Image: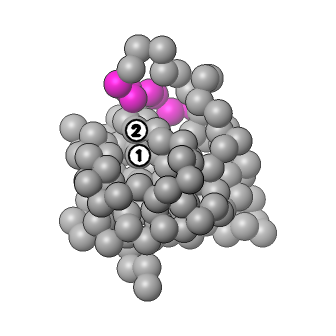
């Protein structure tokens, strides 16, 4: 059972977008955003939810990523490798994104590799989001 995950509606694009924007504007939190419906995405949502025991950690699951791609593309990007920009992130793939609401900044991106993220990688992603 998910306890700290906001699942964005799939049928109502406007509500989905408003819910994401509201979550980004909450301070200070780290958002672990999962885009897609792959098996990896489902298992990663579950694991990220279990790792979100601290009050500043939240999970957002966007099963219809096309509802929110353009919002994520407007965020600052500090992923940690020099050629990473929001323009060269393939938003059409199932990916995991960690956003720090402190600066509305993307701090981590991982594409679907066919395996769910393990708990250590999720902790690392959350820690990158909180710096």
**From what the image shows, is residue 116 above or below residue 84?**
below
User: Which quadrant would the N terminus be assigned to in this image?
Assistant: bottom left
User: Which quadrant would the C terminus be assigned to in this image?
Assistant: top left
Secondary structure beneath dot 2 equals strand
Whether residue 44 is visible to the viewer of this picture, yes or no, is: yes
Label ID, residue 98? 1
Q: Do labels 1 and 2 touch, CB within 8 Å? A: yes
Q: Main secondary structure of the magenta part?
A: loop
Mark 1 is surrounded, within 10 Å at the Cα level, by few (under 14), some (14 to 19) or many (20 or more) other residues, namely many
Residue 13 position, x and y percent, is 74, 59
In the displayed orientation, state which residue is furthest to the top. 82
Residue 92 position, x and y percent, is 70, 41
**Residue 84 lies in the magenta stretch:** no
Q: CA distance from mark 1 to mark 2?
A: 5 Å
Please give the residue where the numbered disc 2 appears in the rendered image: 108
Q: Earlier in the sequence, mark 1 or mark 2?
A: 1
Would you say 20 lies left or right of 54 here?
right
Between 131 and 112, the residue placed more toward the observer is 112
Mark 2 is surrounded, within 10 Å at the Cα level, by few (under 14), some (14 to 19) or many (20 or more) other residues, namely many
Residue under the image location 54 percent in, 60 percent down: 40
Residue 54 position, x and y percent, is 21, 65
Give the quadrant of residue 62.
bottom right
Would you say 44 lies left or right of 95 here?
left
Tally of marks: 2
Residue under the image location 56 percent in, 48 percent down: 112
Give the quadrant of residue 120.
bottom left
Q: Write down the region rendered in magenta.
A: 74-80
Residue under the image location 28 percent in, 66 percent down: 51
In the displayed orientation, state which residue is furthest to the right. 11
């Amino acid at each position: 059972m998910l306890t700290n995950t906001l699942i964005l509606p799939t049928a109502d694009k406007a509500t989905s977008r408003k819910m994401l924007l509201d979550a980004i504007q909450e301070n200070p939190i780290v958002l672990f955003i999962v885009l897609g419906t792959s098996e990896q995405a489902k298992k990663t949502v579950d694991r990220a939810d279990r790792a979100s025991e601290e009050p500043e950690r939240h999970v957002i699951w966007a099963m219809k990523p096309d509802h929110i791609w353009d919002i994520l593309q407007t965020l600052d990007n500090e992923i940690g490798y020099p050629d990473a920009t929001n323009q060269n992130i393939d938003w059409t793939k199932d990916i995991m994104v960690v956003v720090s609401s402190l600066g509305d900044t993307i701090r981590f991106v991982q594409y679907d590799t066919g395996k769910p993220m393990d708990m250590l990688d999720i902790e690392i992603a959350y820690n990158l989001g909180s710096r």
